[in-house]
Image (tube, rainbow, N blue to C red):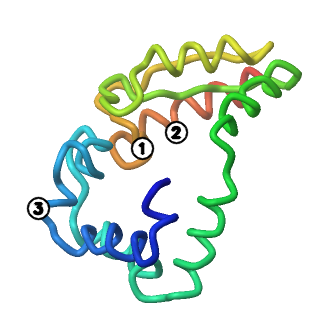
Amino acid sequence: MAASRVPGGLFLLLQSFRVPFLVAMGSSLGGMAAHGIPYERVRRWYRPLLTDRAIRRDLARFLRSTRKDTYLRAAERLRHFDRPALVAWGAEDRMMPPETGRRLAELLPRGRYVEIPGAGTLVPVDNPAALVGELRRFIGESG
């Protein structure tokens, strides 16, 4: 993440989470939930990053240490995961389209893909009842 490499960049980027209009934008958190996220919830989620310099420092350190191919290397390791795996994906996900979820499930030898209706990227926020239903079904079938 480029902001983590510029002195003060991460702090400035995080300040956008103090402005409800910016949070609600489709290119921000607003694009991750099919039905929006209450601003007070966003404030709770990001308060530690906004108020604690040590947490920002740790996040910046993590972001700088992450290699560009981290996700590709992780995906390759999934091919060797031999347990049942459920990939529950938001049917209305605009940030990561359902095709991405289907490809992820195909990487897993025992992967199963399900779409959660009425949900974007943040499936537990948008449709927790449907997610719980799919999890119960999956656990019941998988043992």
Query: From the viewer's perspective, is the residue at label 1 or at label 3 nearer?
Result: 3
Mark 2 touching mark 3, by CB under 8 A? no
Q: What is the secondary structure assignment of the residue under circle 1? A: helix
Q: How many numbered marks, from 0 up? A: 3
Residue position for label 1: 128
* Horizontal arrangement in the rendering, residue 7 relative to residue 84 (left or right): left
Q: CA distance from mark 2 to mark 1?
A: 6 Å
**Residue 48 shows in this picture:** yes
**Front-most of 116 and 76?**
76
The picture places residue 39, in percent across and down from the top left corner, at 21, 67
Rendering quarter of residue 94? top left
Above-or-below relation of 23 to 116: below
**Front-most of 109 and 103?**
103
Q: CA distance from mark 2 to mark 3?
A: 31 Å
Q: What amino acid type should be assigned to the residue bearing mark 1?
A: Pro
Residue position for label 2: 132
- Residue drawn at 68 percent across, 35 percent down: 69
Q: What is the secondary structure assignment of the residue under circle 2? A: helix
- Residue drawn at 46 percent across, 76 percent down: 7
- Residue drawn at 68 percent across, 45 percent down: 67
Residue position for label 3: 21
